[in-house]
Amino acid sequence: MKQRILSGIQPSGKLHLGNYLGAIRQHLAAQNDPNSDCYYFLANYHSLTTIQDASVLKEHTLDVARTYLALGLDPSRSLLFLQSDVPEVCELTWILSTLTPMGLLQRCVSFKDKVSKGIASNHGLFAYPVLQAADILIYDSHLVPVGMDQKQHLEVCRDIAVKFNLTYGETLVVPDAVIKDEVAIIPGTDGLKMSKSYSNTVDLFGSDKEMKAQVMSIVTDSKGLEEPKDPDTCNVLALYKFFANADERQLMADRYRAGGYGYGHAKLELLGKLKNYFGPYREQYLELVKRPDEVMDVLRSCGKKARATARVTMDRVRAAVGLP
Ligand code: ADP
Ligand code: TRP
């Protein structure tokens, strides 16, 4: 039997290098494995916890879909769909909620983080991990590739699945998170975790001007051009290393140590690498900007397939809990 790989991404803003290296790249690589069956969705119900403007949510949703398609998601091999095209996930969320201890959710750091950043603490934000658990469990997912920040949500999901199975008998597949250590936390232009909520991103498909401005804004220490520099603490090299080969990485580190090589030089090299790497994808992306209907058609037809899978699980769940 094929293993089901599933992940979700919130359409809550432009996608950036952290999303790409921490999540999207793994999602796309998985579709090349003939033993995997990949489901990727845009978590628009989740985004409602923070975006309450219909046109903004719709635009972000289309944008994330385009980005995945431009980067190589192939709808004949993987499903790319809208969370909201499978409303059964909300029914499962309710059923799982009745098994979820309050304390489990109260311990979730992402809720506390969001509230401390000023996001209104509505019930949806608090119950967010239960909806995420339903997303995963409704498709009998085996593996869930995510960034490190989602580790706790995956643990909550496993706890809920185990509790369901203990309460009602073996019904749900207990999934495993897949977290790649080397891309666990991609630093942003200020050296902290890259995140759209910290305004420290390098976006995947910004204009040339935007990308240049973001790269040039990477924070470095104030050492002068001639001074030797420490490659191990440099935010530019921390990103460059993902797009350069071993020799190029070594060369940049040697130049830093030798002195006479400035951060401005390194930033331009990084910019060159990013343009080369993302250039062809960017063309695809700009093509898709012109064809929103085509993008929606892909989402809808994948959504139908995902919904059929979800319904089978829901029949099992309803029978297990006693909903005739
Ligand atoms: P953001 O922090 O910008 O809001 P999301 O929370 O929407 O990003 O993350 C979407 C996916 O990208 C998740 O799987 C997350 O783990 C991954 N991700 C986001 N930022 C990073 C980062 N800086 N390093 C590694 N992975 C990341
Ligand atoms: N919470 C995830 C994030 O912010 C998005 C998400 C929603 C997700 N449902 C999921 C990820 C299910 C993996 C599996 O990145």
Image (spheres, helix red, strand yellow):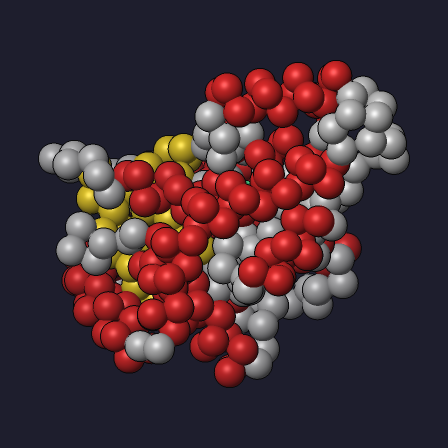
Residue shown at 67% from the left, 35% from the top: 266
Residue 103 vs residue 251, the one in the foreground: 251
| Quadrant position of residue 295 | bottom left
Q: Quadrant of the C terminus?
A: bottom left
Viewed as shown, does residue 270 lie left or right of 319? right
- Is residue 96 visible in the rendered image? The answer is no
Q: Quadrant of residue 186?
A: top right
Q: Can residue 33 be seen here?
A: yes
Identify the image quadrant of residue 281. bottom left
- Which part of the image, by quadrant, shows the N terminus? top left
Q: Position of residue 31 (x, y in %)?
A: 24, 43
Q: Which of the two residues, 69 or 211, is positioned nearer the viewer here?
A: 211
Position of residue 264 relative to residue 89, above or below, is: above
Q: Position of residue 292 (x, y in %)?
A: 33, 77
Residue 214 in the image, given as x and y percentages of width and height: 67, 54
User: Is 112 on the left-hand or right-hand side of 274?
Assistant: right
Q: Position of residue 273 (x, y in %)?
A: 51, 41
Instruction: Indicate left or right for 191 with 13 as reference.
Output: right
Q: Residue at x 63, y 54 (%)?
A: 212
**Image check: 37 left or right of 228?**
left
